[in-house]
Image (spheres, rainbow, N blue to C red):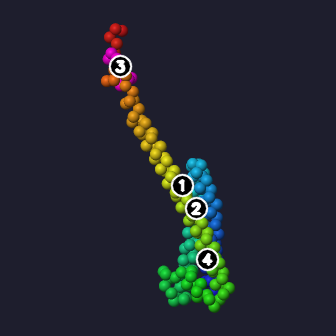
Amino acid sequence: MASLMEELIQTLDAEESLYRELIPVQEEKTRAIIANDLKSLQDITVREHELVDKTAALEQKREQVANDIATVLGKDPKTITLEQIEEVLKNQPQDQEKLQEVHDRLRKTVMRLQELNDQNKDLLKESMEMVEFNMNVIRSTRMSSGSSNYSSNASEVAGMAPPHGMFDAKQ
């Protein structure tokens, strides 16, 4: 059981470190969105996906370790939480303290990432709305051009109909 706890703590610590690496990437992403720098945004997205893939592997490992711990404790692997595992460690205060510490750091890091993700999501939504607005302005400008230019006769659109037909018969 002790080795499982150590493995869980190490996995959570590694997961928190990767999430912490994502924070400056998300902050850089925010700056790229604001600057409308699509090239940087594309590069940032590639780096972001690499880190997310690494965290997914650690997440899978953490779930496996938690399932093993649940099996040892006779608990349901699908519903076991870190708080329940911490409670089991009340007789081992050092392990309990380590687990609580890494759990708290992980929670704070994930909360910060969530804030940045929400901010970036809002910025992207606003950016898309601005692009849509600009596209609508361009469309309406194209549709209205030429239709409001009347000649003094007011029955003809200026520049649309030649004054004497297509060909000049005098030539």
**Mark 1 packing: few (<14 Cα in 10 Å), some, or many (20+)?**
some
Look at the numbered disc 3 and give the secondary structure of its residue.
loop
Q: Nearer the viewer, residue 94 or 119?
A: 119
Let me know if residue 162 is in the magenta part. Answer: yes
Residue 134 in view: yes
Q: Do the residues labelled 2 and 1 touch (CB within 8 Å)?
A: no
> Which residue is painted at 37% across and 30% down in the image?
147
Q: Which of marks 4 and 2 is in front?
A: 2
Question: What is the quadrant of residue 163 in the picture?
Answer: top left
Q: Is residue 125 above or below residue 78?
A: above
**Residue 87: image location, x then y, percent:** 58, 86
Look at mark 4 in the image and give the residue it sits on. Answer: 103
**Residue 32: image location, x then y, percent:** 60, 52
Q: Are marks 1 and 4 in contact (CB under 8 Å)?
A: no
**Extreme-bottom residue of the structure:** 91
Separation of marks 1 and 4 at Cα, in angstroms: 30 Å
Q: Nearer the viewer, mark 3 or mark 1?
A: 1
Looking at marks 3 and 2 on the same chain, the residue that comes earlier in the sequence is marked by 2
> Which residue is painted at 54% across and 89% down in the image?
73
The stretch in magenta equals 157-165
Separation of marks 4 and 2 at Cα, in angstroms: 20 Å
> Which residue is painted at 37% across and 22% down in the image?
151
Separation of marks 3 and 1 at Cα, in angstroms: 51 Å
Q: Nearer the viewer, mark 1 or mark 4?
A: 1
Q: In this view, does 91 lie above or below 119?
A: below
Q: Are marks 4 and 2 in contact (CB under 8 Å)?
A: no
**Residue 60: image location, x then y, percent:** 55, 73
